[in-house]
Image (cartoon, helix red, strand yellow):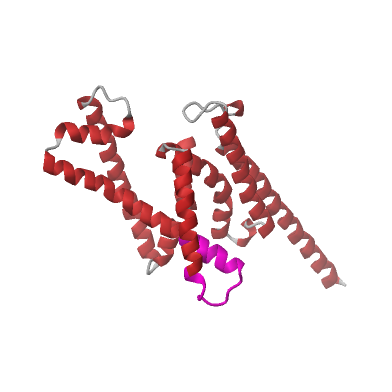
Amino acid sequence: MRLVLIALVTLTDPGFHQRCYAAKTPRVAALGIGFAIGCWMVFDALSTTTGLFARALVPGLTDSVMAYPALAEKVLPAGVKGLFYVGMLAPIMASIVSYTFIAAMTIGRDFLWRLRGDTDDRHLPGYIRFGLGLTSLAAILISLAIPSVVKQWYAFGSVLVPGLLLPLLGAYAPPRFRPPANFAFLSMLLGATVTLFWLGWGWGHGGFDAPHFPWNWQPMYPGFLAAAAIYGGGLLLQSNKSVATAEVGTIFAQE
C-alpha cells in the first residue's frame, strides 16, 4: 500500500501536468500517457531481469546499487562497455536538466512573477535564473543530506503526496468538491508538515536504514489523515454555507 501511495507522486509532479497541457489536443495527451506507461512497463521488466542476471552472475555483490556496473564489468567487452556507461549517464543527465528547468520555471513564473504582481515578462528571465540557482543549491544540499536516491524518492513521495494530492484532485473535480482556498492551502501545509515531522522523527530515532516511526505508522498515513480532516472540514463548511444561502433565498422569495 505504501508503494502504491508513493507512486501517486507522478500526479503531483508539475512536469506531468505541464507536458499534458503542452499537448496539441487532449487525445494526444492521453495517447502520450498510455505510451509512456507502456515504456515504463518495458523499462521495469528490463530492470528486474537485469537485476536477476546480476544476482546470478555476480553472487558476491553486496551493494545492489552497483548491480549494473558490476554486471557490465563481468560480461561486456571494452567498446560495448563504454556505450553502456554512456547509456547509464544519458537518462541521469536528461532528468537533471528536465527537473532543474521545470523547478526553475515553477519558482520564477508561478511564484515570484505572480507574488510580485508583474504585468509583463521583463523581469521573468531574472526570476527564472534565480529559481535555477535556488533549485541547484537545494538539489546539492539534499544529495549531501540524503545520499541514497531511493531514500530521496521515498522522502519526496511521502511528503508531497499527502500535501498535494487532495487539492490537486479537487482542481479537476466539480466545484462542490473544492473547499475554500484557505482550507485547501491549510490542507496542503498541514499534510506536508505532519508527514515531514513523522519522517524526521523516524529517521532521527533509527537512521535512514531502520527508521522507527511512532506506532509503526508510515509517514504518509498521518499526513493523509491531517490533510483529509482539513479538506473535509472545508467541504462541510462550504456545504453548510450553501444550504444556509439557499434557505435565506427561499425565505426572501416567499416574502
- Residue at 28% from the left image edge and 38% from the top image edge: 47
Q: Position of residue 215 (x, y in %)?
A: 61, 26
Report if residue 74 is visible in the image. yes
Q: Quadrant of the C terminus?
A: bottom right
Q: Where is residue 68 in the image (x, y as percent from the top left)?
A: 25, 36
21 lies above or below 197: below
Which residue is most to the top?
Answer: 60
- Figure quadrant of residue 172: bottom right
* Residue situated in front as seen by the camera: 193 or 69: 69
- Residue at 33% from the left image edge and 34% from the top image edge: 65
User: Taken as a whole, is the magenta stretch helix, strand or loop?
Assistant: helix
Q: Is residue 193 magenta?
A: no
Q: Where is residue 149 in the image (x, y as percent from the top left)?
A: 40, 40
Which residue is most to the right?
Answer: 255
Q: Give the left or right position of residue 95, taking residue 84 as reference.
A: right
Q: Is residue 120 magenta?
A: yes
- Residue at 27% from the left image edge and 32% from the top image edge: 67
50 lies above or below 236: above
The image shows a total of numbered marks equal to 0
Report if residue 8 is visible in the image. no
Q: Give the left or right position of residue 195, taking residue 140 as reference.
A: right
Q: Where is residue 122 in the image (x, y as percent from the top left)?
A: 50, 76
* Magenta residues (range): 104-125
